[in-house]
Image (cartoon, grey):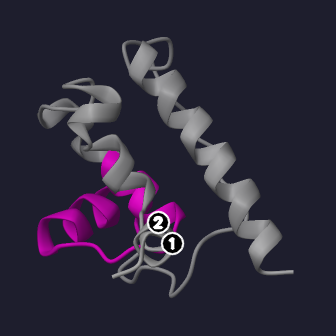
């Protein structure tokens, strides 16, 4: 696989889980829901357990076939909004979205 091909298949979840980029910032069960949220947002496949979290959080039975154009997150107290990891995740998400919109036009 050529380096450019590998980079084009890299997902936001791959970057979150890359120990060289973020270390253990996104490890642990507490990041599970955020990972499912990002997978659904970007139209990535969900595991059976991820689909169950998706159903519980959205009330929807089926995941949308592709990525969403926009999302709003209502995050309560101690939801990880101010953590360094969440800021990094938002940054990754916005940069990845900007790249995706440039490549689809």
Q: Residues within 10 Å of mark 2 (few under 14, many from 20)?
A: few
Residue at image x 42%, y 13%? Answer: 83
Q: Secondary structure at mark 1?
A: helix
Disc on res. 4: 1
Report x, y in % for residue 5: 46, 78
Left or right relative to 31: residue 88: right
Disc on res. 7: 2
Give the overall secondary structure of the magenta segment. Answer: helix
Q: Indicate whether residue 38 is drawn in magenta.
A: yes
Please determine whether, in this image, residue 74 is positioned above or below residue 104: above
Residue 70 visible in image: no
Answer whether labels 1 and 2 touch (C-beta < 8 Å).
yes
Q: Residue 78, located in which quarter of the rendered image?
A: top left
Residues rendered magenta in the picture: 35-59
Q: Quadrant of the C terminus?
A: bottom right
Report x, y in % for residue 30: 20, 31
Q: Secondary structure at mark 2?
A: helix
Report how far apart the C-alphas of labels 1 and 2 lie in the structure.
5 Å
Report x, y in % for residue 35: 32, 49
Q: Quadrant of the N terminus?
A: bottom left
Judge by depth and name the residue closer to the eye, 99 or 75.
99
Residue at image x 46%, y 26%? Answer: 86
Please determine whether, in this image, residue 54 is positioned above or below residue 79: below
Q: Indicate whether residue 69 is drawn in magenta.
A: no
Left or right relative to 17: residue 57: right
């Amino acid at each position: 696989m050529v380096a450019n091909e590998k980079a084009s298949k890299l997902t936001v979840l791959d970057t979150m889980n890359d120990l060289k980029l973020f270390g253990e910032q996104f490890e642990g069960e507490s990041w599970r829901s955020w990972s499912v949220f990002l997978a659904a947002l970007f139209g990535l496949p969900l595991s059976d357990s991820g689909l169950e979290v998706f159903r519980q959080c959205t009330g929807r039975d089926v995941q949308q076939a592709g990525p969403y154009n926009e999302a709003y997150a209502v995050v309560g107290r101690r939801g990880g909004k101010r953590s360094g990891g969440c800021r990094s995740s938002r940054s990754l998400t916005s940069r990845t979205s900007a790249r995706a919109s440039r490549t689809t036009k």
